[in-house]
Amino acid sequence: MKNSFKKVALGGVITSNPTLKLVLGTCPTLALTTAAMNGLGMGAAVTFVLICSNLLISLLRKVIPNQVRIPAFVLIIATFVTIVRLALDKFLPPIYESLGLYLPLIVVNCIILGRAESFASKNGVGWSILDGLFMGIGFTLALTLMGAVREFLGYGTLFNVQIMNFQIGFFSSSAGAFFTYAVFIAVFSLVSSLISNKRKRKAFAKTQTPVQDCAKEVE
Amino acid sequence: MAKFFKSTAFKCTIVLVCLMIVFGGGLAILNSLWSVSPEERTMRALQKIYDTNAEIKYETIYEEDSAKEEDKKDKQFDGVGKINKIYQVGDDLIFQSTGEKGYNNGTITVWVQVKTTIVSGQNQYTIEKVVLEGYEKQTLMSQLKSSYYEKFNGAIEGDKTFTTEAGSGRHTNPISGATKSATAGNNAVNCVIKYLGGK
């Protein structure tokens, strides 16, 4: 199937959003969305790893034998995750501390291995970088939005700035994470199905118009 | 033999080994460039305590890793925890201590800033600030804001330690649903109280 910029961009952010549509990478999504900043930090780290691993996997796709592609992909992903860990620990220690255990767990994040296997190993370097970028943006947006909602309702703050003087403890708990995630998926599915139905109706209307015109002409 | 060198198995092995060598070498170089030294970590902790980005001058009084066995004895408390590090910054003593008996036998490590004043010829110790450093098996701790640790602030009264049980010692409300984690946090601070009380 032929790639286009629009298809790759919309795919990563909306139609194949890794968090809300494909429901991949749920572990960090549930655990790290207690604050918007955590979501942003995790999203940025995953985006970097996605872009770099997609780039390298696409470059080496003809060199890596099919039989060892998965171990090779994991090796490449683990290298970039280690680079992110080292860089964050050195230059952004507060974010490194807040991401904690979930930073090394990026290695086993299904989004990255999934994109490596289904896209980067079959497409050119440019498209693979774009795919990594937009998948990363989709993941970051979902995590940051979820984090913002949970932080606002759970602590009354937004990006650590006090907005309201109330707290609903439920939203900062694990149960709150599942609830917020479910609401986000439901709303996302509803909106995307409404848009897709509207598009289908438009497309159908377009195909019908010439036929009706022809009918009029015959009359 | 020639057949083996042309085989897929050989090619797979070579590709994986090459990837390992290249990435391993690259990571080794990056690690030597970006690794955070223990001194830098101590400075970061002190800057967190004093809420500043400026360089803080400190004197090392005790570090468990380099201490002799006899020096460790009065800094380890059975069933409570241990003191890992002691630094002096001006009139302040800065302790890093680990509290035991958390959830699932986990631990909590905190930094405790103690101000020393002399009142009628005797040292008076006041806890100024408690900052979380790390924890084992106590995931809830990451969700607690710095305001939680303010309950420890105040003058140290003899050997009166913190407890989650009302009616004994200095009672602190346990974290909702995590009394054992709260106990480990209390124990981390109690190590400092016990150490200063024994001096």
Image (cartoon, coloured by chain):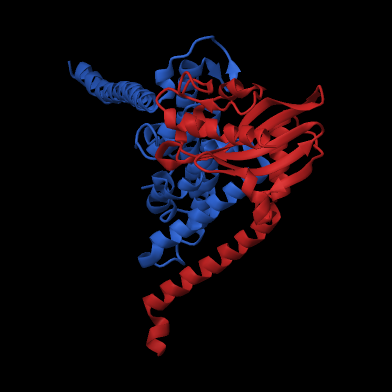
Chain colours: A blue, B red
- Residue B190 rendering spot, x and y as whole percentages: 58, 32
Q: Residue at x 52, y 70 (%)?
A: B18
> Residue A206: image x %, image y %?
30, 23
**Looking at this rendering, what residue extends furthest in the left direction?**
A219
- Residue for point 46% across, 16% down: A153
Q: Locate residue B172, reporting x and y percent.
A: 51, 21
* B139 or B192, nearer to the observer: B192
Q: Residue furthest bottom?
A: B1
Instruction: Say whether residue B149 is visible.
Output: yes
Q: How many marks?
A: 0
- Residue B38 appears left or right of A95: right
Q: Residue at x 52, y 66 (%)?
A: B20
Give residue B179's position: percent from left, percent from top: 43, 28
Q: Is residue A1 above or below residue A196?
A: below
Q: Is residue A39 visible?
A: no
Question: A14 or A196: nearer the eye?
Answer: A14
Side of A12 relative to A44 (left or right) = left
Position of the C terminus of chain A, as image quadrant, is: top left
Q: Which is nearer the eye, B160 or A85?
A: B160
Q: Is residue B167 left or right of residue B28?
A: left
As rendered, which of A204 and B185 lies closer to the eye?
B185
In the displayed image of the protein, which residue is found farthest to the top?
Answer: A165
Q: Residue B29, relative to residue B100: is it above or below?
A: below
Left or right relative to A190: residue B96: right
